[in-house]
């Protein structure tokens, strides 16, 4: 399938996935918070757990994307996730690598954990897949009550903490980078 076809099909897949769960609940079954007036970029910058991600976002000059209309879902690696990776993606010399890493953590559409769980439950394989802005594939599965996500290169993480609904999407904290560090 050519690149144009991937991008033509991706929004349909995301809309189908988003329709599966209704988006009205959190992973623990409680009602999701009302979306804030803050954008994804402001939400990430306002959370101390994402200090490294904020530096990478600023360095890669992708803040304008996350300030824009969206919606997007950002699978946001914690500071601890960056500690385990090689290289300082917030360094000016790593601007391109940081931008590539960020695009591999963003999918079009606003997806809550309830949406992701519903898509997994409806799939015959026990997984759900989403295409990122980097045109890589993220595969979601359940391990008990925990949602796991695996990048197409084998990098694996867990959705942790609380999701945050922003005015233009959703921040989903993850405990690992979803791309393997070069090297």
Image (cartoon, rainbow, N blue to C red):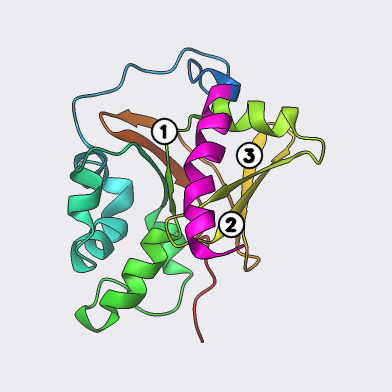
* Measured Cα–Cα span from mark 3 to mark 2: 16 Å
Count neighbours of disc 2 (C-alpha within 10 A) and say few if under 14, some if 14 to 19, many if 20 or more: some
**Residue 78, numbered label:** none
* Apparent side of residue 60 relative to residue 132 in the rendered image (left or right): left
* Measured Cα–Cα span from mark 3 to mark 1: 17 Å
Count neighbours of disc 3 (C-alpha within 10 A) and say few if under 14, some if 14 to 19, many if 20 or more: some
**Disc nearer the start of the sequence (2/1):** 1
Residue 52, given in percent of the width and then of the height, sits at 30, 60
Residue 126, given in percent of the width and then of the height, sits at 78, 38
Depicted 135 relative to depicted 43: above or below: below
Q: Nearer the viewer, residue 75 or 8?
A: 8
Specify the segment rendered in magenta: 1-19
Depicted 81 relative to depicted 97: above or below: above
**Residue 110, numbered label:** 1
* Measured Cα–Cα span from mark 2 to mark 1: 17 Å
Depicted 18 relative to depicted 43: above or below: above
Q: Which residue is mark 3?
A: 147
Residue 5, given in percent of the width and then of the height, sits at 53, 55
Residue 67, given in percent of the width and then of the height, sits at 19, 44
The image quadrant that residue 95 belongs to is bottom left
Q: Residue at x 56, y 27 (%)?
A: 115
Name the quarter where the N terminus is drawn. bottom right
Question: Tag 3, which secondary structure?
Answer: strand
Q: Nearer the viewer, residue 15 or 165?
A: 15
* Apparent side of residue 135 relative to residue 152 in the rendered image (left or right): left
**Residue 137, numbered label:** 2
* Apparent side of residue 45 relative to residue 101 in the rendered image (left or right): left
Q: Are marks 2 and 1 in contact (CB under 8 Å)?
A: no
């Amino acid at each position: 399938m050519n690149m144009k076809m991937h991008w033509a099909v991706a929004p349909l897949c995301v809309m189908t996935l988003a329709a599966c769960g209704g988006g009205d609940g959190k992973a623990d079954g409680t009602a999701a918070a009302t979306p804030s007036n803050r954008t994804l970029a402001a939400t990430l910058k306002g959370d101390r757990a994402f200090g490294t991600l904020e530096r990478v976002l600023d360095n890669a000059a992708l803040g304008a994307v996350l300030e824009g209309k969206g919606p997007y879902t950002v699978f946001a690696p914690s500071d601890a996730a960056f500690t385990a990776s090689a290289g300082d993606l917030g360094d000016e010399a790593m601007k391109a690598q940081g931008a590539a890493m960020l695009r591999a953590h963003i999918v079009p559409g606003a997806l809550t954990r309830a949406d992701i769980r519903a898509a997994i439950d409806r799939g015959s394989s026990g997984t759900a897949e989403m295409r990122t802005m980097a045109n890589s594939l993220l595969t979601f599965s359940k391990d008990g009550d925990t949602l796991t996500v695996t990048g197409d290169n084998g990098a694996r993480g867990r959705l942790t903490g609380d999701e945050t609904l922003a005015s233009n999407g959703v921040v989903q904290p993850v405990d690992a980078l979803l791309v393997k560090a070069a090297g």
